[in-house]
Amino acid sequence: MMPARRSTTMLANLVTWGLVLLISFPLIWMVVTSVRPQTELFQIPPTVIPRAITFEHYIKLLQETPFLRYFMNSMILATSTTIVVIVVGTLGAYSLVRFSYRGRETLAALVLFTYLLPSVVLIIPLYLMMVKLGLANTLTSLVIAYTTFALPYALWLLRSFMAGVPEDLESAALVDGASRIGAFIDVILPQALPGIISTALFTFILAWNEYLYALVMVNSDQARPLTTGVMNMLITSFNIEWSLLMAASVMMSIPLIIIFAFLQSYLTRGFGAGGVKG
Amino acid sequence: MVTVTFDKVRKAFGEAVAIPSLDLAIASGEFVSLLGPSGCGKTTTLRMLAGLEQPTAGEIMIGERTVNNLAPSERDIAMVFQSYALYPHMSVRENIAYPLRKRGVPKADRPAMVQAAADLLQLGPLLDRKPRQLSGGQQQRVALGRALVREPKVFLLDEPLSNLDAKLRAHMRAELIELHRRLGKTMVYVTHDQLEAMTMSTRIAVMQGGELQQFATPAEIYHRPANTFVAGFIGTPSMTLADGEITMDQGRPVLKLGTLSLELPADHLSERPEGTRRVTVAVRPEDILVGTGSFRANVRLVEPTGHESIVLVNAGDVGFTVRVAGDTVLKAGETIPLDLRRERIHVFDRESGRRLNADLAAATADPVRSRA
C-alpha cells in the first residue's frame, strides 16, 4: 500500500474512533458511575477508571426499592402494546393493501394524519376518557394510549411491507385450496415477517422509553413503569441519587441492548422500508 | 368430462368495462388459448374462471356446476402464474405438497404424489431447494408440478412461458403439448404470443377489447380469420391490409385496390354486392407471388432471414408484404412482376370488419387438429 494511502486510512480510522468515543462517552460514564463507590463519586479531580468496583448500588436497587416492580410493569406494558399494535396493524395493513373498498385511500391518509398530530395535544383528552372509563392509573390506560400513537405509524410501516408481497402468491395459495385467512397465515405472514419483526421492535422500544404519557396518566406506584418510576424514586427536589440512577439506567438499557444485538438486521431493514416506500 | 362455459359473462371494474359480454364454450379435454394483445381481457377472463375475480354478470360453469359464487379453493382447478408464484419460504417439495396439504390429502399419501409429479417434470434432484436457488425454467416446472400434483379438473395457465428465454420457451412448449396429451385434462392458456397459441392449442379464442373475436382451431383462424382484427393480428409477418372496392362485372366480382384491378372467382363472396361495396382486403405474405403475373411492383426493402426473405413491395399505391424463398435474389429499387393468389384473398366489410368470403374451398381444406 502506498504511504499516502495508508496515512489517509489511518486518519479516517482516527476520526471514526474519535466520534465513536465521543458519542459513547455518556454511556461509558453511566456504566462506570454505576459501579463506582459512593465516596469516589464527587471526588475532584474525577477519576476516569474507578479505583474500586462495587455492585452495591445494583443490590440496593433490587432489594430496597420497587425497581423490579417498575421493570415488570414496563415489560408488561411494552409487550402488551406490541402485541396489540402488531395484531391490529398487520390485519389493518393487509386490508389497506389487498382489499378495495370505498374510502380506502382516505382512510390511509387519515391514519397518517393522526400520526402527524403532536402527542401532547392528546394527553388531556385521553386522560379524561380513561377517568370516565374507570381505567385511570392502570397499565391498561397506558397500553391504550401508546396504541393510539404507535398504531398509525405501525400501519404505515407494515403497509409498505405488505405491498411488497406479490399478490400472485396469495392468489396461488387461494387456488391451491387455502381460505383467505389460510393464505394470509401460510404465505403473507412469512413474507412480511421481517417487516412485522422490525415494526414490533419499534413499538416495543417506543413503549419502553415513553415518559410523558406515563407521567400524566399514572401516579400510583403499583402501575408506574420504569421511566417515571425511577425518576420518581431517585430524583427529588433536594437530592439526586446518582449512583442508583446510573445503575437503574444500565439495567433499563439491558433489554433494548439485547434486542438490538439480536435483531439489528431486521431493524435496519425496517428503516429501509420506511424510508423508501412508507 | 369437464367443460368450461362462459355464459354472457360481464366484468366491469367500477366504470371501466373490461369484458362487455363473453360467451365461450370449451369442450372437455381441450387445450384452449386465450390470445390477444395486452389489455384485451384474457387474463381477467382466466382470473374469473379461477375465482380470483368476481364476474359482474353472467354465469361461469365448470362441468355442470355454476361456479360464480364458489371460492377458488372450491372449484377444483389449478393455476400456473406468469410470475410462477412459488412460495419463497418453502422448499420445492413443500411448494408441490402445499395443495395436497390444503385439500386434506392424508399425510402418508403426500410424499408419493409429490414424487410422481416431480418425476414427471424431472424435478427429483431439486426437491429440497428453495425457489430462489432455481433457474427460471426450473421454477416454471415447479409451478407446473404444484398445479398437476393434485389432478384438478381444469388447468389454468397465465402466460407461463413469457419469462423464459426463446430456446427454453420452445422446449417448454413441446413439454406442455406432451403433458396435455398425457393428462387429457381441460386446459385454458392465456398468452399474447400467437406462436404459442398456434402450436399448442386445439382451439384459440382471439380477444380484443374484452370481446371474443373468433373461437376456432389454429388452422381456421389462420386461413379464415373472422374479421380484420384477427386477420391483422395472426401471422408473422402480418397480412397486408388494404382498403378497396368490389363491383360485379358480368357475374364476377371485381376488386379494385388503388390502381390495381383484379377479378375474383365467381363464388368468392358469400353475398353478391349490389353496386359498389367498400371492403378491406387482407393477403398473407405467402399468397403473393413474385416473378409472375401482370402487376408491376417496386421492391422497397428486402429482409433476408435465411430460409426465407420478407420483401416489402409497392404495387400501384398499395404496399404489400411478401414472403419469398431465401434463395430468391431481389434488390431494393427493382421492378418485378407480381400476382396475388385470388382464391386466397380475404375480403372484409370495411365498416363492420366482418368476413365476406364464401370459404367453401377453405372449409374442406382445413385440417382440424385435436389432441384431446
Image (spheres, coloured by chain):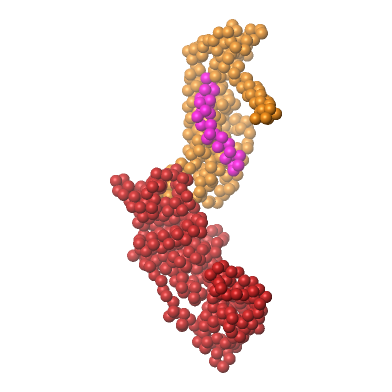
Quarter-of-image position of residue B4: bottom left
- Residue A197 visible within the image: yes
Residue B342: image x %, image y %?
Answer: 54, 83
**Chain B color in figure:** red
Residue at figure coordinates x 54%, y 19% from the top left: A250
Q: Decide if residue A161 is on the left or right side of residue B296.
A: left
Residue A175: image x %, image y %?
Answer: 42, 53
Q: Decide if residue A250 is on the left or right side of residue B99.
A: right
State the quadrant of the N terminus of chain B: bottom left
Q: Main secondary structure of the magenta part?
A: helix
- Residue B65 visible within the image: no
**Chain A color in figure:** orange
Q: What span is colored magenta in the figure?
A: A251-278
Residue at figure coordinates x 37%, y 64% from the top left: B181
Q: Decide if residue A118 is on the left or right side of residue A229.
A: right
Q: Is residue A165 magenta?
A: no
Q: Is residue B337 above or below residue A258?
A: below
Residue B280: image x %, image y %?
Answer: 59, 78
Q: Is residue A265 magenta?
A: yes
Residue at figure coordinates x 39%, y 62% from the top left: B178
State the quadrant of the C terminus of chain B: bottom left
Residue at figure coordinates x 65%, y 30% from the top left: A1
Residue B67: image x %, image y %?
Answer: 40, 60
Q: Is residue B372 above or below residue B342?
A: above
Q: Is residue B371 above or below residue A52?
A: below
Report the front residue among B72 and A23.
A23
Q: Is residue B149 above or below residue B212?
A: above
